[in-house]
Image (cartoon, rainbow, N blue to C red):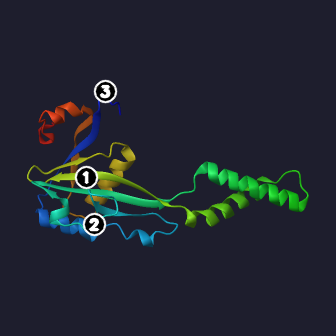
Amino acid sequence: MSLVNPTLSLNVFEFEAKPSAEEALEAFAGQSIPPIETLNVEPISGWATSRFLLDREITDETCRADKYVRVNFAKAERKVPKSLLTAYCRMEELAVMKERGLQALSRKEKARIKDEMKKRMLPKMPPQLTGSDVALDLPARRLYTDATSQGRIEKLELLLSSELIPFVNFSGLLADVDQLPLESIANGYELGEIN
């Protein structure tokens, strides 16, 4: 994002049902992200408030702004950085070669060392957090999200139209507002006016 001409990328969808704010908040709260302490090797995900990615307190006070319900789809996972994994694998390979008096290791042995090293290092890695902001304009039956990649949009569609939150049924992309100038918003441009 340029500092001279800042932009905002978002997608706008319409949904068919018109839930109340209470129904929406209850549905999101029912699928809130598990506590970070439960994170092991497998990723965890769920809904959080827009205040921060681990805020599980989804209430009227934390997620309502006028006619909007604003939440965040958060994901926490542990990853071993590739360069760190490569360095540790190489150290282990050299130790094994020295111990066995070998000049090189087979691909199978290198793969075994890599898998073993990843299993050993993964639980020690700090969690990495990502999220997609979602704002529901309930009276207009519109959903705004900063998810712009096809994969993230498909994941949101699946989550929102599944039985987890059955009131949302995407009727299609209303607008793909890519690189909307922030000055438009600063000058009072209403997101609800996008068509």
Where residue 4 appears, as percent x and y from the top left, is 31, 27
For label 1, the residue is 134
Q: Give, as a three-letter code, the residue at label 2.
A: Leu
Where residue 129 appears, as percent x and y from the top left, is 41, 56
Of label 3 and label 1, which has the lower sequence position?
A: 3
Rendering quarter of residue 18: bottom left
- The number of callouts visible is 3
Of label 2 and label 3, which has the lower sequence position?
A: 3
Q: Which mark is residue 164?
A: 2
For label 3, the residue is 4
Q: Calculate the distance from the C-alpha at mark 2 to the C-alpha at mark 3.
A: 42 Å
Residues at marks 2 and 1 touching, judged by CB atoms closer than 8 Å: no
Residue at the spot x=23%, y=34% of the render?
A: 182
Label 1 neighbour load within 10 Å: few <14, some 14-19, many 20+:
many
> Relative to the observer, which residue lies in front, 80 or 178?
80
Location of the C terminus (image quadrant): top left
